[in-house]
Amino acid sequence: MKYLFSGVLSFLVLIGPAISSAGELIIYSQNKGFYTEHINKKFESKGHISFQIDDLTDQIIQSSLLFDSDCLEVYSFNFIDNPASNFNILSSYLNDTIRLVKYGDDGVITYSTEGKLLMLNPTPVFEIDGHIAVNPPYDYIFPNIPENITKSPVIQIAGKTKNKICQLSVSYLSGGFDWSTSYSLTMIDKESANLEAWFQVQNHTRKSFEDINLTLVSGDIKFADSGQSHIPLKRTMALASFSSEEMDRSYSPDVLKNEDYIRFRIPGKVLMPAKGEKHFLYKAEENIPVIRSYHLAHNVNYRGRGETNVEDIPITTRYTVSGSVLGEHNHPGGVFRIYEKVKNDNSAVFVGSDASSIVRRGGNFKLNTGKTHDITAVYTVKNIDSQKHMTNYEVNVVFTNSKNEAVVVEFSEIMNRPDWGIRDKSHDYTKKDSRTAVFLIDINADSKAELTYSFYTENK
């Protein structure tokens, strides 16, 4: 059964979103925000007072409330949240008479009666024409919105003031906020690209914020479980381009550093609409160096004596961008979308994407964008000799480059045992870590290259 509240709908349209005229909002990438509002209060007298603050977020963490004032001492507060839901409005009309109607397909009322609401939990029970009706098939029309219905959570405060005019700062944590970064990398030739990065900031609460200072925190911040449930956010993937109404290119954020985290402060005053999102320019750089490389990682799984095989493996394409080119600080992770400019044209072609975690100062963005079929490898285990304490392998890898340019493939052999060694090799290698050997294979244009080696792993 559906509930239609003609009074409720008009009420919500008239009040519009709640707007706070001042404050500071810090948003973390863990579905949390920390909001501080500065309020000037004028009281009729000094001493013991009580008042109400409304327009809180609907996902406020009540236990996180902080009050700060030089002239006002808060000694108790009461939290009230009674939004305009079906249940809350019906609860306000318990033991009252409500108009019950039916609508036709054209939306016109075809039947109308009245009923006294006797019970509500778990379903509405009415007295209609002297009879008891449990959850009758009607829609409801209310004469007005009950006074106890709040458009947003409120707190009723009791305290003691030294002055008639006081400034009070109210701070709290809230769910319903998130931010992410979207990077667009457009290759203008084989070794350089133009980069654009945008912050995508989401406000999923019913509260609008006007003229606030907005800061975004990059880092893995821990939030202890408060025991209060909040609506989980579904991250949306930022688009590669936006309409002019969605973007703000006028300024980029200030980078603020402390001992543990990087903060990005959006310059000026910001409007964050309820149930909405905004995009702010993070970086716009031209002709930055980009390294395009090719990689293949092979994992040696355990094989028994004589268990050889042949594997046809495509090669992964990787784009590497130095974080130092974008600034000497940590850079937030995000989704990179990579494009290539079309020669003699202003258009671009999408060639792949990858997600990156936070890049530390001096680190690199390493973006694996997919498999190329212009470069392939055939991996063959020619022989396996498994003994009591050691297993010996003979391996042959043939690389084929179908491109009209020479390439270098980084080939990694990942061992299944920590004790291993390589011998009888056709190419030199480096030991990347305790289980990985790395070969660099040069392959001429439209040609093949062969890698042969044998290795052993100790059986323990």
Image (cartoon, grey):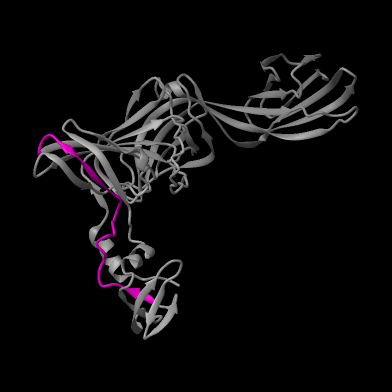
Judged left or right of residue 282, residue 418 is right
Query: Image quadrant of residue 428?
Result: top right
The answer to which of 275 and 342 lies nearer the viewer is 275
* 60, above or below 379, in the image: below
Q: Position of residue 12 (x, y in %)?
A: 28, 61
Q: Residue at x 46, y 30 (%)?
A: 220
Q: Residue furthest front?
A: 48
Q: Position of residue 320 (x, y in %)?
A: 53, 26
146 is within the stretch colored magenta: yes
The answer to which of 175 and 451 lies nearer the viewer is 175
Query: Image quadrant of residue 352?
Result: top right
Q: In this rendering, does residue 82 appear at all?
A: yes
Judged left or right of residue 196, residue 340 is right
Judged left or right of residue 436, residue 124 is left
Q: Residue at x 22, y 48 (%)?
A: 52
Q: Quadrant of the C terminus?
A: top right
Q: Residue at x 66, y 35 (%)?
A: 374
* 362, above or below 100, in the image: above
Q: Position of residue 386 (x, y in %)?
A: 89, 22
Q: Quadrant of the N terminus?
A: bottom left
Q: Residue at x 72, y 28 (%)?
A: 298
Q: Which residues are magenta?
A: 139-164
Q: How many numbered circles are shown?
A: 0
